[in-house]
Image (spheres, helix red, strand yellow):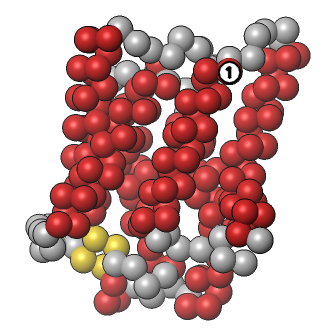
Amino acid sequence: MEYVISFFMYSPCVIYQLMLIVRYVKQEKKCPLNYFIMVNIFLLYLYMIFDVTGIGTLKDLMNNGVRYMNIINIRPFDSIGIGFFLNIIMFMPFGFLVPFIWREYRYIVKTVAVGAIFSLLIEISQLFNYRVTDIDDFMTNIFGTVIGYLIWKTFTQVFKVHIKVEIKNKWEPLTYIILAITGIFLFYKL
């Protein structure tokens, strides 16, 4: 049963990928398998992040409502500990994968902006459950994205490896992030 629920969480992204494949077929272009493999690795990473961060779901919202007051920490560096450093490590793959997969995001400002939006969406979604929305998490996630980007930059300079697929949607990483969050919000813990 858990695998069926996992598929439904993943289904908005699968539908989007199928739409892309149909578009390639209609345009009589070769379907970029390496791109779809890397995107699915990215999606797997997103779901692992969701599992660790515990984002809020529709069920949480219906059961608990939005609980703002005692679960928001806006004091920076209030909770420095092992979790502080684990948040940095957790977002390093994000900073690596986004520019590796999407040519449009091979600039640090764009990659960090998407990482900040992703982190902000996670923190906002935590208002729907019993997790703490924390400014430290937001800052460390951004810092992890920057470190991941710098690792990607070094990796590509040394090994000269890129995915050479041109997707005509400059919002592609955000599209996958929003679809993945939507799938989890709607279908997780039904």
Name the residue nearer the viewer: 25 or 123: 25
Q: 86 or 172: which is nearer to us?
A: 86
Residue at x 42% of width, y 66% of height: 53
Could one spot residue 173 in this view of the protein?
A: yes
Residue 121 appears in the rendering: no
Is residue 77 shown above or below 159? below
Q: In percent of the image, x 61 and y 91: which residue is there?
A: 63
* Residue 172: quadrant of the picture: top right
In the figure, 179 relative to 170: above or below?
A: below
Q: How crowded is mark 1: few (under 14 residues within 10 Å), some or many (20 or more)?
A: few
- Dividing the image into 4 quarters, which one contains the N terminus? bottom right
Q: What residue type is labelled 1?
A: Leu
Which residue lies at the image location 68% right of the left edge and 21% below the top edge? Answer: 33
**The image quarter in which residue 78 lies:** bottom left
What quarter of the picture does the C terminus occupy? bottom right
Q: In this view, does 190 lie to the left or right of 143?
A: right
Residue 179, position as x, y percentages in the image: 64, 50
Q: Count numbered badges in the picture.
A: 1
**In the image shown, does 38 or 102 lie closer to the viewer?**
38
Find residue 64 and report its horizontal and vertical position in percent.
55, 91
Q: Is residue 4 left or right of residue 52?
A: right
Vertical arrangement, residue 119 with respect to residue 51, above or below? above
Residue 89 located left or right of residue 184: left
Left or right: 9, with 153 as reference point? right
Q: What x and y, as percent, mark residue 170?
A: 55, 27
Q: Where residue 91 sits in the image (x, y, percent)?
A: 33, 48
37 in relation to 143, above or below: above
Which residue position is annotated with label 1? 33
Q: Residue furthest right?
A: 26
Quadrant of res 186: bottom right
Instruction: Please report the residue visible at 55 percent of the width from the left and 30 percent of the height from the top.
Output: 38
Q: What element carries label 1?
A: helix
